[in-house]
């Protein structure tokens, strides 16, 4: 089949996705965003001076986890851009 006559991939036709697929994609997307944003919110709270969040960053080693997350996110973005 020629590329010009082949049907469009399903990602370009979201109306073809079933309800379970849409909900699954939404939940997966939310989980990924939360995994990224929770450490950012904790770091922001620490910088703003909230004591409980300062405990999370300083005493529990949250800064190292944040650095690891940013490192992995950066590598993932670079790999995606290179592809």
Image (tube, rainbow, N blue to C red):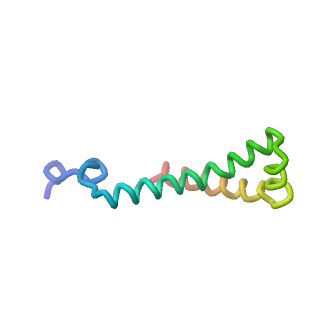
Q: Position of residue 47 (x, y in %)?
A: 80, 41
Q: Quadrant of the N terminus?
A: bottom left
> Is residue 16 left or right of 31 when viewed as pictured?
left
Numbered label tally: 0
Which is nearer the eye, 65 or 28? 28
Q: Is residue 58 left or right of residue 40?
A: right
The location of residue 75, given as percent across then percent down, is 59, 55
Residue 19: image quadrant is bottom left
Residue 52 percent across, percent down from the top left = 81, 51
Q: x%, y% of residue 37?
A: 62, 48
Question: Which picture quadrant has residue 72?
Answer: bottom right
Residue at horizontal 16%, vertical 48%? 4
Task: Please give the name of the residue rendered at 81% of the width and 60% of the height, measured from the top-left corner.
Answer: 61
26 displayed left or right of 11: right
Rendered residue at 28%/49% (across/down)? 14
Residue in the image at 47% along x and 58% along y? 28
Q: Nearer the viewer, residue 83 or 77?
A: 77
In front of the other: 23 or 63: 23
Q: Is residue 8 left or right of residue 56?
A: left
């Amino acid at each position: 089949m020629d590329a010009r006559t082949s049907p469009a991939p399903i990602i370009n036709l979201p109306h073809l996705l079933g309800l379970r697929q849409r909900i699954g994609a939404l939940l997966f997307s939310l989980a990924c965003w939360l995994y990224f944003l929770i450490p950012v919110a904790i770091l922001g709270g620490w910088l703003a001076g909230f004591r409980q969040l300062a405990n999370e960053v300083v005493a529990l080693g949250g800064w190292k986890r944040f650095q690891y997350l940013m490192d992995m996110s950066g590598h993932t973005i670079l790999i995606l851009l290179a592809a």
